[in-house]
Amino acid sequence: MSIENIKDYYGRVLQTSSDLKTDACCTPEAPPAHIRAALALVHPDVKARYYGCGLIAPEKLEGLNILDLGCGSGQDAYVLAHLAGPKGRVTGIDMTERQIAEARKHEDYHAQAFGFPRANTRFEHGYIEDLRSADIGPDTQDVIISNCVLNLSPDKPKVLAEAFRVLKTGGEFYFSDIYADRRLPAAWRDDPVLLGECLGGALYWNDFLQMAKQAGFADPRLVSSRPLQINDTIRMLTGQARFFSATYRLFKLKDLEPSCEDHGQAVIYEGGIAGAQDLFVLDGHHRIEAGRIFPVCGNTFRMLQETRFAPHFRFIGDFSKHYGIFPGCGTNIPFTDGSVASAAAACC
């Protein structure tokens, strides 16, 4: 995998998102109103250099330190800066000098457009595998986001390890990327088009899960996914391999359990999160309506109680009792005598 090929593809070959040959970086859902409002304030020149049509923005970012891995010309970073508010701070890092130069040109413009007394952004040329080079220290970031960038890295385990290192305890890595249904031929990582289109470096999904756990993110949560639409020219190169765009959230929490364990716990969402007043979506299995008692496993309980989401929930139960695997997540014995019926419940 050639870093120079990636720089060339994103710095010279691509001029706008219309030059892409797949919809890998696109998010089909319309963003919520508060994100649309922030997007409307982004400088037109920044939008013109944006190589995608999606945006990655988790909930509740006010006042946080946020890191954007592979920020490009800064569109996502500036939207995040607006959501973080004047007391928040957004750092963008990218390996393409032309993209960083474009992002830096518009810092004062966005501060004024947002009504902030000063810019709350900084943009650094560097590599997401080595965040020390951008002067990003350990335990300093509340949230890390990344939009279709991890697949471009030649050292994905290092990216995940660096994300874990710089996150505060209770922080999260929230990102979208491309995954394959199988391990791909190594030669694809040297094809400039397949690599630039985010396919050549796509991880087999199960390899990604193992990498994330080895980096310290014990319980990766899949938020959403969709199959990619690939044109005929690219399909001739990729054959029967299937590709998916997926958004994951990885929490930095110590001693999460390796499975979904049932401790008789539940939560009640009390609302109050912008864009999620009536429904909070933790991941694809946890769509938590406001006001309802929602049973959860121990890991989910901690992902809400020990993170920035805690003020918006009531918590029922503790860890004093254990009832086995959480219903719907399997059984705590690998066999059955025919007397145990599987429970129908939300799987963690």
Image (spheres, helix red, strand yellow):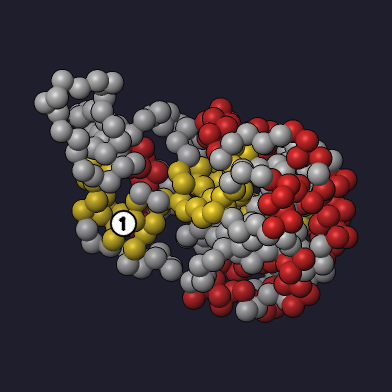
Q: Position of residue 35 (x, y in %)?
A: 54, 71
Q: Residue furthest left?
A: 339
Q: Quadrant of the C terminus?
A: top left
Would you place residue 120 above or below residue 125 in this image?
below
Q: Position of residue 87 (x, y in %)?
A: 58, 63
Q: Amino acid at mark 1?
A: Ile
- Residue drawn where x is 81% and y is 62% of the image: 14
Query: What SS does tag 1 mark?
Result: strand
Q: Write down the quadrant of residue 323 in the picture.
A: top left
Q: Residues within 10 Å of mark 1 (few under 14, many from 20)?
A: many
Q: Nearer the viewer, residue 222 or 184?
A: 184
Residue 134 appears in view? no
Q: Nearer the viewer, residue 135 or 184?
A: 184
Residue 197 appears in view? yes
- Residue drawn where x is 54% and y is 66% of the image: 28
- Residue drawn where x is 59% and y is 48% of the image: 243
| Picture mark count | 1
Q: Quadrant of the N terminus?
A: top right
- Residue drawn where x is 79% and y is 51% of the image: 193
Would you place residue 223 above or below residue 57 in this image?
above
Q: Position of residue 109 (x, y in %)?
A: 75, 76
Q: Which residue is mark 1?
A: 288
Q: Write down the quadrant of residue 99 in the picture.
A: bottom right
Q: Write down the quadrant of residue 9 in the picture.
A: bottom right
Q: Position of residue 45 (x, y in %)?
A: 78, 75
Q: Nearer the viewer, residue 171 or 233?
A: 233
